Image (spheres, grey):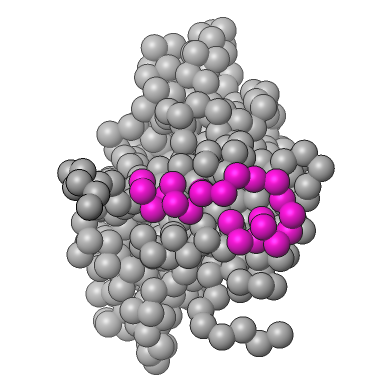
């Protein structure tokens, strides 16, 4: 069926690409070994550094977040190295799978998919590792399958308390440019990201921000690498070039998106995401549904994962919402398939888009016969527009 009006892409990424970004990409592709391209690359790297909050190198791959994850491993580790991965959800599982395929040994710290990585557990494990066999700790900052945000500064402190030299590798795919992230200040060694979420660019780019310690680890890292090798990339990047053909038109889009983030100001971007996270959670509570994230200190501001009432399937609800209201919501991933739906509220987004999104969910639940209380949308509207002073009712 043809639907009029906009499609609501409310999955937790790829996110709605702003018209400005789309228009910026609609330009002729240029010579990626020419002077105009070099200027573009250097501008992008400088802009990305401001978003990652780092003065260290940021590399850009034509690829996606998963490619950048593989890059983080192959540049810093050797076959048989032991690493810790926290089981926070589907994306942590992906990190585990990639590691095992590469021949790394994974200590998978069990989790119930409703909480973040535990700093006390990390400290215990690292303190017990007297021989410093563990070479890296991997944490998904915002676990996109659950809407739980781990507290990276606390994990850094745990590593420091244990006086352990393991590298800290953080997946910021669905947190960067949505809520606070500080590569340098938090002592992260490799931060991994993709273009299609908070950065508001279509899918197709993967990023690694790389600390000095990670660069030093590369000197002894023996995992085979070619495409993802940082050495050649960083040498070429210095002059604004790449060892292979970069994704030129996505770069135009990224330049525009970085410009938009700077115009709004990163702190304002974070505050906007925080308001939208809070309003979404207000709606879910008013509906009487359960938020997957158990600890309010770990609520994600980029997306909210919601449990379906027992006996009701999330995919049936999502289908009704797609068919009737032309809106896509996130699926439940892995063990949450059918049990959870996810509302993306990140990227290029505003109050009325959120109101429309939540209205679509509430109407969908009515039509699909999902038990809930009315008033979720109203709770969100009140959260978005609190009464400043009570005026007397006449
Ligand atoms: C937290 C997280 N990590 C990794 C990935 C994988 O990234 P990509 O799909 O860009 O390869 C995703 C994708 O949604 C993600 O949300």
Foreground of the two, 293 or 73:
293
- Residue 207 showing in the rendered view: no
Can you name the residue that lies furthest to the right here? 311
Q: Nearer the viewer, residue 29 or 241?
A: 29
Residue 318: quadrant of the picture: bottom right
Image quarter of the N terminus: bottom right
Which range of residues does the magenta coloring cover? Answer: 362-383
Vertical position of residue 389 compared to residue 268: above or below: above
**Near-viewer residue (288 or 250):** 288
The percent position of residue 188, horizontal first and vertical second, equals 39, 35
Q: Position of residue 367 (x, y in %)?
A: 70, 62
Residue 55 belongs to magenta span: no
Vertical relation: 121 (above or below) 89: above
Q: Residue at x 39, y 53 (%)?
A: 381
Q: Is residue 378 above or below residue 139?
A: below
Say if 11 sits above or below 161 in the image: below
- Give the residue at x 40% y 43%: 278
Q: How many marks?
A: 0
**Most extreme residue toward the bottom, as rendered?**
28
x and y, in percent, of residue 264 in the image: 22, 61
As rendered, which of 106 and 34 lies closer to the eye? 106
Q: Main secondary structure of the magenta part?
A: helix
Residue 362 visible? The answer is yes
Would you say residue 379 sits in the magenta stretch? yes
Rendering coords of residue 253 (x, y %): 38, 75
Residue in the image at 41% along x and 88% along y:
26
């Amino acid at each position: 069926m043809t639907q009029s009006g906009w499609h609501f892409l409310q999955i937790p990424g790829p996110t709605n690409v702003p018209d400005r970004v789309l228009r910026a990409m609609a330009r002729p592709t240029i010579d990626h070994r020419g002077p105009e391209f070099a200027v573009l690359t250097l501008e992008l790297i400088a802009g990305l550094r401001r978003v990652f909050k780092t003065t260290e190198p940021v590399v850009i791959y034509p690829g996606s977040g998963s490619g950048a994850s593989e890059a983080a491993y192959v540049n810093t580790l050797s076959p048989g190295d032991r690493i810790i991965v926290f089981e926070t959800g589907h994306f942590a599982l992906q990190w585990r799978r990639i590691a095992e395929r590469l021949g790394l040994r994974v200590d998978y710290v069990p989790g119930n998919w409703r909480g973040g990585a535990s700093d006390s557990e990390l400290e215990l494990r690292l303190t017990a590792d007297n021989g410093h066999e563990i070479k890296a700790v991997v944490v998904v900052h915002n676990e996109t399958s659950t809407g739980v945000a781990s507290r990276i500064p606390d994990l850094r402190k745990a590593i420091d308390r244990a006086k352990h030299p393991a590298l800290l590798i953080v997946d910021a795919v669905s947190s960067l440019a949505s809520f606070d992230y500080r590569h340098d200040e938090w002592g992260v060694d490799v931060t991994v990201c993709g273009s299609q979420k908070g950065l508001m660019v279509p899918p197709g780019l993967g990023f690694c921000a790389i600390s000095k310690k990670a660069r030093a680890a590369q000197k002894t890292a023996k995992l085979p690498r070619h495409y993802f090798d940082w050495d050649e990339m960083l040498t070429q990047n210095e002059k604004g070039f790449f060892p292979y053909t970069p994704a030129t038109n996505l770069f135009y889009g990224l330049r525009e998106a970085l410009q938009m983030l700077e115009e709004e100001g990163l702190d304002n971007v974070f505050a906007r995401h925080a308001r939208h996270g809070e309003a979404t959670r207000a709606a879910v509570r008013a509906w009487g549904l359960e938020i997957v994230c158990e600890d309010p200190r770990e609520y994600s501001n980029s997306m909210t994962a919601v449990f379906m009432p027992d006996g009701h399937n999330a995919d049936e609800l999502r289908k009704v919402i797609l068919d009737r209201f032309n809106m896509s919501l996130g699926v439940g991933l892995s063990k949450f398939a059918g049990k959870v739906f996810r509302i993306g509220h990140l990227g290029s987004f505003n109050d009325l888009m959120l109101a429309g999104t939540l209205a679509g969910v509430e109407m969908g639940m009515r039509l699909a016969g999902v038990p809930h209380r009315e008033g979720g949308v109203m709770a969100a509207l009140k959260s978005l527009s609190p009464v400043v002073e009570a005026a007397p009712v006449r």
